[in-house]
Amino acid sequence: MTFDIGNMSRRNMLKSASVAALLASSAGALVAPRRASAQDAKTIRVLSVEDPFFFSMKAMIPEFEKETGIKVELESLSYDALQTRLVSAFVAKTSDADVIAVDQMWLGQYLDNGWIISLNDYIAKDSDIDLADFIPEVLYSSNMWRGQIATLPVAAYAQGVMYRKDIFDSFGIAAPPTKASEDWTWTKYIETLKSLEGKSFGGKPLFPTVICGSQPSPITHMFTQLSASHGANWFKSFPGAPWDFSPQLTGPAWSKSLEVYRQLYKLSPPEAINYVWFDAGTRFAKGDIGMFYWWTPYFYLVKNSGYMTGKKSDVMDKYATAALPKADGVAQTVSLGGWSLGVPSSSDRQDNGYAFIKWATSKATQKKMAEWPDLNFQFSDFARKSLYEDADVKKIYSYLDVQYDMMKQGNGKITRPPVPGYTAVESVLGLTLNQLLTGSEDPKTALERANSLFESILKGNLMIPYQKESYADTLDGAKALIGKLGKA
C-alpha cells in the first residue's frame, strides 16, 4: 500500500519512520547481552535470508558437518522478516542464533549496539583464512566499521547492465561496452533505450527497460546506484572524518538523478511502480524488455523463469551483460551490497560460529557453491579475487570479467551508508521516490521535504550534531587493516 506523504502530517511521518530506529539504537546499549540458552556445544543455529546464496550454501552444509562434527540448524526468512526478527530479538535480549546474515546497511547499528562481535581477533589468529584474497572494496563497503571487521561476505553484489543481444542485433543497435567508458554514460543509456520505444519483437510489443518502484527498499536500492553515479551524497561528511550527518538531498545531483529515474519509469511497464527486487529480473526473463541495470545476481537469475525454479527462461541464451553507465564528467561509483555472516554477542558458541563463517566464505566452499548444478547454476556472487580468475568457474559464468570490474569501482558506504538509523531515513527516501514516479510534484520540492524529515529523524536519533567520536573511514585504511590482520 502507498500513501501521499505530501498530505501526511510531519508528526505522523516522523513517528512511523523513526520509532524502530530509535528503539534499536538506544535499547541495545542499556543492558548487557543475554547469552542464548545452552544447547549441544556441537550444534549451531544459522539464521539467513533466502537470497540465492542460501540454496547452494544449504546444499554444502553436510560437508561442513562431516568435516567439523558441528551440526547446523539452518533457518531462512524473507528480507523484511529477517530484519524485524533480528532487531526485535536483539533489543529484547532473546536472540538464540549463533550465525546471522547481515545486510550491508545494518552493519553500523549492529556493531555499535554490541549485537554482533568483532572478528578481528579471530582473523588475526587464523593463518589460513587468506584475508588478502577478498576484494578490498567489498570488505570496506560491507564488512568494516570503525576499524573492525564485524562480518565476512558470503555473497557480494555490484550493479551492472543486462541487455537482449538478439533485439539489439535485429534493430542494428550497438552493444553496450563490457568495460567502463567515458562514452558509456547515462545520457547514452537513455538514448539507446529510446531507440527501442514503440518497437515490437517476436510478435509482441517491447518495453525499452524495467525499474523497481516499490518502496521503501527496492526503489532505494536501484535509484541510489543512479544517484551515486551522479555524485550525490546522503550526508555532509561521511565516511570521511569528521562525521557530519546533515542531510544533503537538496543538491543538484539528487534532482538530476530523479529526472533520469523518471525517464526510466516512462520507458518501463507501468506496473513497475509496484515491482520489488526480483520482479524486475522476472520481467526481463519473460522476454519483452530490451535492457536494464540491476544487482549482479541477476546476471544469472534471469536464466530461470522464476526465482530459483531451475526452469530455463525465454532469454537464457539471448542476453549479455555490460558495464554500468556513468554520469558525464563524474567519476564512477558503483553500488556494492550483498550479504555477510556475523556472530551475535549473545551466542555461547562463538568459536563454532566463526568456524562456520570461515567455511562458508572460503574459496573452496564458494567454488563448490558456484559449481552446484541444481537450479541451473545459481551462484556467482564472489567476494574473493581468485574466483574471478578461476578457469572452471569462468566456463559456467561467462560474465565474471564484467562483474569483477564493477566490484573494483564500488563504494557501498557512499551509495547506502551503513550508519545507525539507516532504515528510518531509507523509509522516507523510498516513499518520496515512489510518489515522484507517478506524481507531478516538482522533485526539488519533494527533496526539500525529505531533507527536512531526514534532519528531524537524525536529530531525534542523536546523530545531529554527532556527539560520538568520528572515524576516518577510507578505502586506504581498509587495505591497511587487511594487511595488518593478514600478517598478524
Image (cartoon, helix red, strand yellow):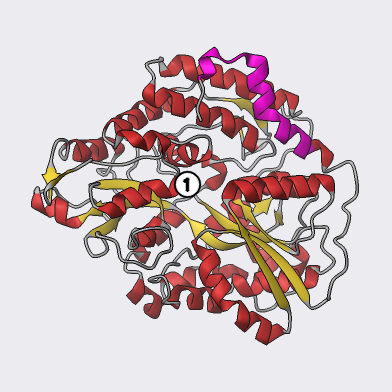
Provide the major secondary structure of the magenta segment: helix
Q: Is residue 83 above or below residue 356?
A: above
Q: Is residue 159 left or right of residue 144?
A: left
Density class for disc 1 (Cα within 10 Å; few <14, some 14-19, many ≥20) is many
Q: Secondary structure at mark 1?
A: loop
Q: Is residue 140 visible?
A: yes
> Is residue 18 highlighted in magenta?
yes
Q: Is residue 348 above or below residue 447?
A: below
Q: Is residue 65 above or below residue 303?
A: below
Residue 349 x %, y % = 81, 69
Residue placed furthest toward the bottom = 66
Pick the front one: 321 or 147: 321
Residue depicted at x 71% and y 44%: 109
Pick the front one: 182 or 341: 341
**What amino acid type should be assigned to the residue bearing mark 1?**
Ser
Q: Quadrant of residue 34?
A: bottom right
Residue depicted at x 45% and y 29%: 434
Residue 153 x %, y % = 59, 62
Residue 310 x %, y % = 38, 68
Q: Which residues are magenta?
A: 4-25
Q: Is residue 203 left or right of residue 44?
A: left
Query: Could you tell me how many numbered marks the image carries?
Result: 1
Q: Is residue 203 above or below residue 312?
A: above
Q: Quadrant of residue 442?
A: top left
Residue depicted at x 42% and y 69%: 388
> Is residue 423 highlighted in magenta?
no
Residue 157 x %, y % = 48, 55
Q: Which residue is mark 1?
A: 335
